[in-house]
Structures are given as C-alpha cells and as structure tokens.
Amino acid sequence: MISSYVGENKLFEELYLSGQLEVELTPQGTLAERLRAGGAGIPAFFTRTAFGTAVHEGSNVIKYGPGGAKAGTVEIMSEPREARDFDGKGYVMERAIVGDFSIVKAWKADERGNLVWKGTARNFNPDCARAGKVCIAEVEEIVPVGALSPEEIHLPGIYVHRVVQGQGYQKRIEKRTISSGGEIKVDKRRELIIRRAAKELSDGMYVNLGIGMPTLVSNYLEPGVRIELQSENGLLGIGPYPTEGEVDPDLINAGKETVTMIPGSSLFSSSESFGMIRGSKVDVTILGAMEVAANGDLANWIIPGKMVKGMGGAMDLVSSNSKVLVVMEHVAKGNKHKLKKSSDLKMEAVICRLPAKESGDSVVDRCITDLAVFDFATEGAEVPPTLAEIAPDTTVDAVKEATGFDFVVAEPLKTMLLGCIPAVAACAVMKPYVGSA
C-alpha cells in the first residue's frame, strides 16, 4: 500500500502497527506527481518535498516483523532517496508509479469513455486513471456521445478502457459540518491562538489552512480582509460551512469536512493543486503540530510505533516558499513541553537545519500558542528562537517554564495582537477576492 494520509482509519493503523500490512507513506503532492509522471511516461523527477526527512533518509518502517511495533522488530525499511543540488537547494528523486490496473470513480461518462467528476471528487482520480495500463471507471451515469461538451470533459477517453455503471449509491459523509449561523464554539485558550493567527492574514492572500484548529482562522478576519482558501484536494475558493440544505457529499475540504464555494471558485485535480503549492503560489500555510523544535523543525504526522496518521500534504506545504505558521497549545497533557530543543518524534520538517545537514533554512517561520508568539531564524539551530509577543496576563518567566528551549526576548516585547470577534459579520463570512492589475 502506497499512501499519504490515513487519518482516522483505525483498522489501517492497527494492521500496519501489528505487521500485517506493508505501507509506504509518501507526501501527498509527491504521490500525485508520481502518478501523473507515470501516466506521462516520465520515469522519475526531483522535488524539494521531503528533503532531509525520514523519507529522504530511508528510515521509515514499511513493514513490522513478528509481534509488530510493540516487539520492535522490523521486516522492511524504506529505501533512501537519491539527492541532488539545484541552485543551492537540496532535492530528492522520486520514481513514477505505473499500475497494471487503475480503478477510478467518476460522476459521468459518455460512450467513448470521456469522464466528468463532480465537485472535489476529482482529486487523485484523473492521475490514477492515467497511471494504469488498463483503466476501469465506475460511473453514476453513462450518456450518449455528444451529450458532454468538449469543455466539460475532465479526462479524455483515450485513458479509459472499461466503463461500469453502478447502482444504488449511498454517499456517506465522514465529517458532516453544518453552518452554525455565525456562532462559533471554541474554548478561550484556543480562541486566543486563532484570533492571533488571523492577524497574519492580509487582503488578497492565497491561504492553505491545515486540519483542526487552523480551519477556524478564517472566521476571525479583520473587516475588509478578503482571502482565498486553497484546499489540497482540488478547490480554490472555499466558502463557509453549508446549511443543512446545501450539504453536498461531493464538495469537501482536505479535512473531509463539507464546505461551500464562493463565486469565482475553481476545481482541479490533486496534481494541479500541489503544482500550485510547490510552485509557491500559496502565500501562507497554517498548520497544527505535535511538537516544534528550537531550530524550527515540525513534527505532526507520526508517533513511531504508536500512532500513524500520514504526512498528507504538510511536507509539500512547508517545502514551498510560502510563510509557514504553526498554531498549537503551548504544553501537552501533564504540562509536558511541546516546544523542545529537538523533537522526540520523527520530523515532519522538509529540511533539517541541524549542523550535520547542508541547509540552514527554517521550516516554521512563526509559532503561535496560547502563551506566546515565537519567531524562528532562517539560520535554524545557529540562532535561538525569539519571543516576539506574549499573551495578556502572562509573564516571561511563565513562558520560560513552559518552553523546552532557550530563547531571546524581543525588545520591545509586545502583547499578542488579536483578530476580531467572530460575531462581527465581516469576520465570519468569507468574501471573494477581486484582484487588480
């Protein structure tokens, strides 16, 4: 199994950790590009994504041995990636994926095999279809040739070998998120983090919001600030959560939540989506994290031997030139440090800035917690983080006690700036962005 994000699939996690399933976890954008390359006859390519991580070094467990992760036995390890320098930056080589069969699900097909997808259901499907020697498409409706206009066809029939019409579809929604009519329920500690993160966004930005707390940031925008949200599964221009009558199982965000689209939105495949990300078209990325290290490394996808989510699109997002913000609570349960000298977990960071590595770039630009705002230097481990802002009613000594690394205090040290209260209509509703030349 080659996968990117398994999320809340407990059975998948259990089978992997018990040694019953071989799993190659790969960044989501890399997976999409490997499929796209396979369909285009490109055997390999270089990408910035995952350079300096366990993916690059070949230290991910693909299959545990007898007794599984608890026994600590490993049967198959991932292979190291070839690396090369381009323009002073490190890249890893990834091999294309070509399958004997590709099985995809589409909305409509005509009798020539041309396919159409509905909403965000396109995601990986076109890339998978192209990468198979034989493509079998299951569709909800087959229409006569000519019923689809050339402009609405998403995948030409040249890639499709068999079409099967299914019946009796029940589209289950994993995360049915309904608009609360402007009321947002969040505890005060998290609200402070989200309101501060909203101050990082300015008019006209393209923004990617990670799963969890980051998805709430857009509700706290200042009046007049218009941003456009990009989702890795193929949507630019995410709107508010739907009302009950607007819910569409074919319209979700990367976190599997039901969403709406603002006027002027666009839909596309996963490879197109990550082309935007790797091509530095997204201005700001806001992610959650399990831990952040003093050098700006980020861990958020695995607790080795215990928990596996998959890296999803985070490695691609932090490898681009977008500004990377991390939002998280300052300490874990039991007041354990989440901000550490170095992370105890496998690094999600695309670049390690430890002295042994070749790069001095930082992954995390700014970390916002319920106690403080830290800035991370581009020199990484050579320069300690800076305490730039402090939460109201908090002291520097309290921040030091709750933080596992040394830091310098900015002069002057500011009190955290907070975004507007979501009861203000302009903050609660996303508005379309109209650019100017």
Image: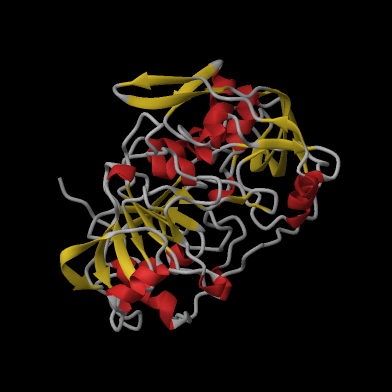
Q: In the figure, 379 relative to 136: above or below?
A: below
In the rendering, at what x and y percent does residue 250 appear? 60, 55
Q: Could you tell me if residue 182 is visible in this image?
A: no
Residue shown at 36% from the left, 47% from the top? 295
In the shown orientation, is residue 245 left or right of residue 421?
Answer: right
Residue shown at 27% from the left, 62% from the top? 200
Residue shown at 35% from the left, 83% from the top? 423
Question: Which residue is more in the foreground, 173 or 170?
Answer: 173
In the rendering, at what x and y percent does residue 315 appear? 47, 42
The quadrant where residue 191 appears: bottom left
Q: In the figure, 271 relative to 224: above or below?
A: above
In the shown orientation, is residue 139 left or right of residue 34?
Answer: right
The C terminus appears in which quarter of the rendering?
A: top left
Question: Which residue is more in the foreground, 196 or 341?
Answer: 341
In the rendering, at what x and y percent does residue 249 appear? 62, 59
In the shown orientation, is residue 357 left or right of residue 135?
Answer: left
